Image: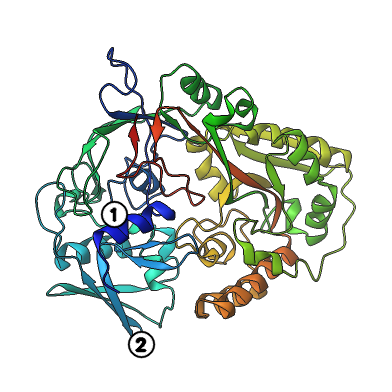
Amino acid sequence: MTVSRRSLIAAASAAPVLGLAACFSESPEGNGASGRIRVAHMQPPRSGLSPLTDDAFKLSRWATAETLVVLDADGDALPWLATEWVQDGPAWTFTLRDDVQFHDGTPLTAEAVANSLAVAAQAAPKPRILDGVDLTVEANGNTVTIATAEADPLLPHRLSSPQLAILAAKAYRGDIVDPVGAGTGAFVLTAVDGTVSAALDRNDHWWGGEVEAAGIDASFVPDGTARAGRLRAGEADIVESIPVSQAGLLEEDQITEVPMPRTCTLYLNCSGGPFSDPGVRAAAREAIDAAALVEGVYDGRADLAEGLLGPAIPWAAERAGRTEPAAAAPVAGTVITLGTFTDRAELPEVAQVLQQQLQDAGFTVELDIREYANIEADALDGAFDAFLLSRATVLDSGDPVAYMYSDFASVGSFNLSQVSDAGVDAALDTASAAVPGEERRAAVLAAETAILNADAAIPLLHERVIQGDAATVAGSRKDPRERELVGPETHLV
């Protein structure tokens, strides 16, 4: 399984692997003169760019923090910092590349890898990809042996998660993980200005070869109109997540639209309040007309959801769907709170349409809309009867099981529905143990059916990522998994 640098770069260019970042430069030299790429991101860091959180996806989109394994376009595991691996029961042994240095000049060693993975395994809370996984790591020469309590057929895929990035020892200081100057990737993170901006320089000693851009200047711009405005004004070279409302205001050659494994979903609180009654959940499902959202809010730039998994996962079309739908109960006068966030420009408008549809069915709906950083904790605590979320369904491992387990298992760490259903848990356990391939895909679809039957969540639509690139940008990554954005080949012309 050992591969050359040339083939690794080719594989990375052909399939989503890494990504993060956003910012713009106000250099009087003008766009392209410095060779630095100005990126405008949607969400600011929420945890100081700790790789143990969703901030890890910023680090990967900047190509600054790397993992042992990456995924190709089909979701299959490829070598990266590890060149090959073998399985022996519950243990996997990974051989490391011998020509990699961290950005602080220290070498990539088995001890450094073991330290990074051990910190992730012992974190509280754990990275989502390790939900339900007991993991131990042992360094031996130029190999690392990673063992789980039970044989895990998906372990190499798990190790592709940006939340399991490998950083130099200097990054770990007590409970703090600081990625500045501690990665192995094509760009060196040099400075972070809170939730405002970040700067990265080209890594002239990157093990993968030449890096074309001089650096990245990233800014965090939660307002979608403002982000798109930077592209129109020539103040940004790459803009992530262009709102649908702004796409029509840009030149056709400035935007790329790709179906992505991201579903706009209404999570219903199954443990308390009105939606603890399956009949009331069924009434909400029947009241919602998702097609009106696709055409009205998204201007047709989305796909109507038939389940949790969308067209970015082709084999999901084989789903059975709901097989045991509950009957709707009377809901006249039932008061519910519906929460969502402003960071994704379409969600507040979707919430308002849902409010009207549910009220037409007899519900009284109170909206609570804030920035994500200010509403996440309440959502996780079950403070809302319903919560509207745009959710990546293969965010971590390239496999939907991690997302389903995190969101719908009784012990899932992102269980917004507060669901605890024995049938769902059993289906997810079966899917988790299945071997990658047809067997696993069938088990995933069976778990999806169990979740839909419980009405724990109402999938509305599958989003398409709309990325904005200036005409002067070449080689930016268009990644449905949102792991990559700027790669070593990205540059200004």
- The x, y position of residue 134, in whole percent, is 37, 73
Which residue sits furthest top? 28
Which part of the image, by quadrant, shows the C terminus? top left
Residue that protrudes farthest toward the bottom in the picture: 89
From this view, report whether residue 479 is shown above or below residue 270: above
Give the residue type that dot 1 points to: Glu
Query: In this rendering, which labeled residue sits more in front, label 1 or label 2?
Result: 1
Quarter that holds the N terminus: bottom left
Observer-nearest residue: 336 or 200?
200
Query: Would you place residue 323 above or below residue 57 in this image?
Result: below
Disc 2 is placed on an element classified as: loop
The answer to which quarter of the image holds residue 236 is top left
Q: Can residue 383 be seen in this view?
A: no
Mark pair 1, 2: CA separation: 26 Å
Residue that carries the numbered disc 2 in the rendered image? 89
Where is residue 39 shown, x and y percent of the image? 39, 31
Q: Pointers 1 and 2 in contact (CB under 8 A)?
A: no
Question: Which residue is at the front of the view, 274 or 34?
Answer: 34
Seen at 43% across and 78% down, the residue is: 153
Task: Say which residue label 1 marks.
Answer: 66
Q: In this view, does 367 lie to the left or right of 480?
A: right
Where residue 241 appears, x then y in whole percent? 52, 36
**What residue type is disc 2 on?**
Gly
Up the image or down, 340 lies above or below 117; here it is above
Left or right placement of residue 149 versus residue 243 in this view: left
| Residue 313 position within the rendered picture, expressed as x and y whole percent measured from the top left | 60, 60
Is residue 330 toward the left or the right of residue 56 in the image?
A: right
Residue 249 shown left or right of residue 154 in the figure:
right
Which residue appears at 20% of the width and 51% of the height? 174
Q: Quadrant of residue 157?
A: bottom left
- Any mark on residue 131, and which? none
